[in-house]
Image: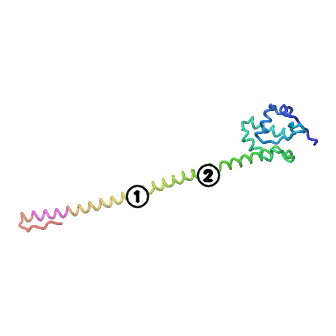
Amino acid sequence: MNEKRYIISDASKMLEVESHVLRYWEEELEIKIPRNEMGHRYYTENHINLLRNVRDLKKQGYGLRTIRMMIGSEQRELPEEKSQISKMEQFKEIMGEIVSNALKENVNELGKSIQSGINYGIKNELQLQLKEKEERDEERFRRLDEIIRSKQNKNRGKFKTNNEQYEQKRKKSLFGGIKKAPKPV
C-alpha cells in the first residue's frame, strides 16, 4: 500500500476538471474508484492516468459512449500490470478494440454495401450483354432483310420477264396470226 492516494479535490485539480465531472465519468464509464474507510473516493496514479486519457479524448471530441468502448472493461478495474504497458501499446490496444467494435457494429452495413456493389456490377454486365445481343440480332435481321429483298427483286424480274413474254406473244397473235398464248400463272 505504498501507492499514493489522492482525494477527489486533488484529482480534479490535477486533471483540471470539476469534481462533479469526475463523479459523472466514474458513473458513465463504469470506472471502479475505490473508497476509504469513511466512504470517500480516493484516486491512485493509475486512476489519474486513466482519467487524463478520458479528458484528452473528450477534448478531441469523442463521446463518453465511444470512450467507454475505448477503455474497455478490463481497463476500468486498472490491474497493476496495465500500468506497466507503454502508452503506445495502450494506444494500439485501444485502436484495435475500436476497429473491432466498429466492424462488429457495421458488419451488416458492410455486407449490404458489398452486395450493392456486386449487384451494380452484375446489372451493368447484364445490360452490356443485352445491348450486345440486341446489336447482333439487329445485324442478323438486317442481313435477313437484305436477303429477302434480293429474292423479291429476283422474283419481280422473273415475273416481269414472264409478263413481257406473254405480252409479246399476245401482240404477235393479234397482229401476226399467232395463237394466243396462255397467261402465265
Kindly identify the residue that appears in the image at 86 percent across and 32 percent down: 10
Kindly identify the residue that appears in the image at 6 percent across and 65 percent down: 176
Instruction: Tell me how many marks there are.
Output: 2
Residue 104 magenta-drawn? no
Q: In this view, does 118 lie to the left or right of 18?
A: left
Main SS, magenta region, reads helix
Q: Foreground: 103 or 150? A: 103
Q: Which amino acid does label 2 sit on?
A: Gly
Q: Which amino acid does label 1 sit on?
A: Asp
Location of residue 75 in the rendering, given as x and y in whole percent from the top left corner: 80, 45
Residue 170 magenta-drawn? yes
Q: In this view, does 146 lie to the left or right of 103?
A: left
Q: Which part of the image, by quadrant, shows the N terminus?
A: top right
Q: Is residue 76 left or right of residue 131?
A: right
The residue pinned by badge 1 equals 137
**Which residues are the magenta region?**
160-171
The residue pinned by badge 2 equals 111
Q: Foreground: 53 or 86? A: 53
Location of residue 4 in the rendering, given as x and y in whole percent from the top left corner: 91, 38
Classify mark 2: helix, strand or loop: helix
Classify mark 1: helix, strand or loop: helix
